[in-house]
Amino acid sequence: MRALLSVHDKTGIVELARGLRALGWELVASGNTSKALSDAKVEHVQVADVTGVPEMLGGRVKTLHPAIHGGILADRSVPGHLADLDAQGISPIDLVVSNLYPFMASPSIETIDVGGPAMVRAAAKNHAYVAVLTSPADYQPVLQELQAAGTLSAETRRRLARAAFAHTAAYDAAIVSWFDGDDPLPPTLHLTYERAEICRYGENPHQRGARYRSGPGWWDGVVQHGGTALSYLNVFDADAAWRLVHEVAADAGGRPAAVIVKHANPCGAAVGGDLLSAYARALEGDPVSAFGGVVALSGEVADDVAEEVARGPQADVIVAGGYTPGAIERLAERRKATRLLSAPAPEAPGRQLRTLGAAALVQDPDELAVLPGGWQVASARVPTEAEWADLALAWRLCARTSSNAIVVATGGQVVGVGAGQQSRVVAAELAVAKAGARAAGAAAASDGFFPFPDGLEVLARAGVSAVVQPGGSVRDGEVLAAADAAGVAMVLTGERHFRH
């Protein structure tokens, strides 16, 4: 049996080589792999000794030779292939061990591997006879199978071939992305996601679901302290809540913040002097909708916060920066079904995709600048300092709520959310109904312009004193006149934030 070893990442290669030699395998190695084996005193021959041609072009050409690829690609069930090998004096290769230049870590022309992918793909194509190893994690299991059975099963060779093609596909996708640079909508998309977690079920229990990852993200640092496995919607809602609570805290200058999300829409959000008051105020926004939702807390959950959360409505997920040991104990005891997640800060969102059968919609992330200084006061009355702060909070929440959306906030607390309505008037009616008496003197946000004055009038009749909206309707003048007639301060952002 014969193995070809040509790796950039030398992790575990000496141990693998020793194990193969102990089983009587002949080893062929290239370049620095050969040096590593020589340093470890592992018997082998160099690729140049097999090809009769030294490495050239600064190492760009080492294994690109019929003596190598013929040995890998020969179909041993075809007599003509075996005759060709015999005529050329080529010995078959039974195992290829190769990983590629580190393009992902250090992208450049010189880290684009050519010979490596060629060998890997050749071995994977001929997996009926050749095994291919692209990950050091597979070295030990393969050695153990060879030691136990003397050969690798067809299932193992197929599994390794699938991993090899996935490896080269991801490598090529990274190179294409490098060529695309910052182009948000390149001519083609080549996406590589690896499965990171199988969800308990999908959006509904009869559906299967999993979380995949395209690169490092905040989910890689999540630690689950209690509760059952996450479902698809647990992950979806936790991601929405965790990103939003960080945005709210940042808008508030780093003050403690709490957000409660239900079905991807916020039903409560607040800032406070401490995390305990932030959570209590977020819950006050809509305690009925909070049942079965996701609670996101911007800091470490101490014992008193845990006690307050445990007394509140059942939460499917709680995600926070961390927990004291006492907090975990309290929550685990009082809320056994709740998943407790501690997590690092979320990464910046990237390109967004939504599949439509055989098609996909692609867009930039919806970057939101909550900078009242860049907004235009269109009304006769100018918002007060307190109203400016509440307008910013309402605008942030509105942008993260399904359209049509109206959000009412007062004193750093969201008190009414009208989400996902076909009519903006109905969204306003829902928001003020939830706010009740708290709408008096509150600020409100609309994710899109008011096409008629009626939505604005719903808010004004409830006592809302300041409204922020994109503007841009052909009836902006009528809407503004209604605001002035009601003494409502009207601010225009010039930018809408629909969310579907």
Image: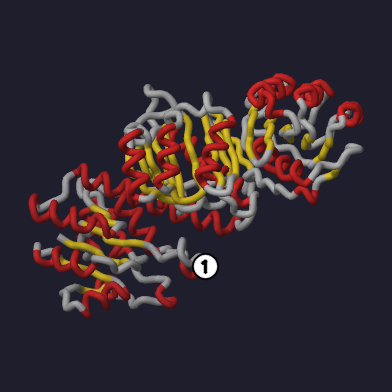
Of the pair 80 and 126, the residue shown nearer to us: 126
- How many labels were placed on the picture? 1
Q: Residue 329 at x, y = what percent?
A: 31, 43
Check disc 1 and give the amino acid type: Ser
Q: Position of residue 276 (x, y in %)?
A: 50, 43
Residue depicted at 33% across the width and 36% down the height: 227
Q: Position of residue 382 (x, y in %)?
A: 86, 42
- Among the 4 quarters of the image, the one containing residue 402: top right
Name the residue located 32 percent from the left edge and 46 percent from the top edge: 162
Q: Nearer the viewer, residue 97 or 317?
A: 317
- What residue is shown with label 1? 108
Quarter containing the N terminus: bottom left
Relative to 186, say whether 228 is above or below: above
Residue drawn at (67%, 23%) of the image: 436
**Percent position (x, y) of residue 428?**
71, 24
Looking at the picture, does residue 366 appear above or below residue 94? above
Quarter placement of the C terminus:
top right
Location of residue 32 (image quadrant): bottom left
